[in-house]
Amino acid sequence: MNPCIITCAITGAEVTKEQNPAVPYTAEEVAKEAYLAMQEGASIIHLHARFDDGTPTQDQNRFKELMDAIKQKCGDVIIQVSTGGALGMSRTERGQVLDLSVEMATLDCGTVNFGGDDYFVNTVNDITYFANRMNDCGVKYELECFEKGHVDTALKLNRQGIIKAPMHFSFVLGVPGGMTGEERDFMFLKDSIPSDSTFSVAGVGRYEFPLAKLSIQHGGHVRVGLEDNLYLEKGVLASSNKDLVRKVKMMIIENGRSVATVKETRQILGMRE
Ligand code: KMH
Ligand code: ZN
């Protein structure tokens, strides 16, 4: 039934408990949210590390603590660590996490404004640095693209042999400064990637569910979670990541697809089983 992979971005680096008390910071909270998301059908947990007070960090020890806590509670779920970290972090700071034993990580494919004075820097040299590091240690990468130029950059680096196939793209749409999450923009990106690659969509804020539906209907995969969207519906905060995963799971089933298991996810993405 053409399984659809659900990734859950449980905490992010920018959202706070002030915005939604369900945003997890501590190892216990992170492991619990990962577990609840997995129970609802998420096979990939997209992970940022934060200290107990919510401060984002790429500190290796903190990442290890969080990953161990997730593995202990969730068993075999795929942990996709963020190499994007938080705005303003350096390349070396962001890359620390790759010294750990990591199965999957994000590879951000270009620079983008993040609203106001904020911007998220990924130069071509940054992308090359992260790709080489991930190639060296056999990490599966998800190519995060916030606009079409990022897709083109990834394809160019693929032609140069730096980014390896099979390529798995994540279109992150609706960031203030990147491409919008309108259907036209989604279609443009989806039609710009090679047919032997896979894609997932992460819609920010109000774009989360409309884009998830489009992706499901066009054979893609989905990402939901408090990192991207704090609301279950207009004016109603999600009480946990599990609410968001459950809602997208229903969408997958209503559209005649099944939710990918962890094993199916590894097969679909060409990962080691
Ligand atoms: N926190 C953003 C600046 C990623 O995880 O790789 C970057 C981000 C991308 O979330
Ligand atoms: Zn992230």
Image (cartoon, rainbow, N blue to C red):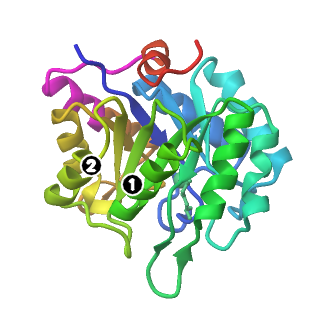
Circle nearer the N terminus (2, 1): 1
Q: Which residue is mark 1?
A: 151
Secondary structure beneath disc 1? helix
In screen coordinates, is 197 left or right of 80?
left
Cβ–Cβ under 8 Å for marks 2 and 1: yes
| Frontmost residue, 145 versus 173 | 145
Q: Is mark 1 within 8 Å of ligand 1?
A: no
The residue range painted magenta reads: 247-261
Frontmost residue, 148 versus 113: 148
Is residue 205 depicted above or below 101 in this figure? below
Q: Is residue 30 left or right of residue 7?
A: right
Q: Position of residue 95 (x, y in %)?
A: 74, 52
How crowded pointer 2 is (Cα within 10 Å; few <14, some 14-19, many 20+) is rated as few
Q: Amino acid at mark 1?
A: Val
**Picture layout, residue 41 above or below residue 14:** above
Above or below, comparing residue 34 to residue 88 in the picture: above
Please name the residue shown 60% across and 49% down the image. Answer: 24
| Rendered residue at 36%/70% (across/down) | 178
- The residue singled out by tag 2 in the image is 192
Specify the amino acid type for callout 2.
Ser
- Quadrant for the C terminus in the image: top right
Q: Residue furthest right?
A: 61
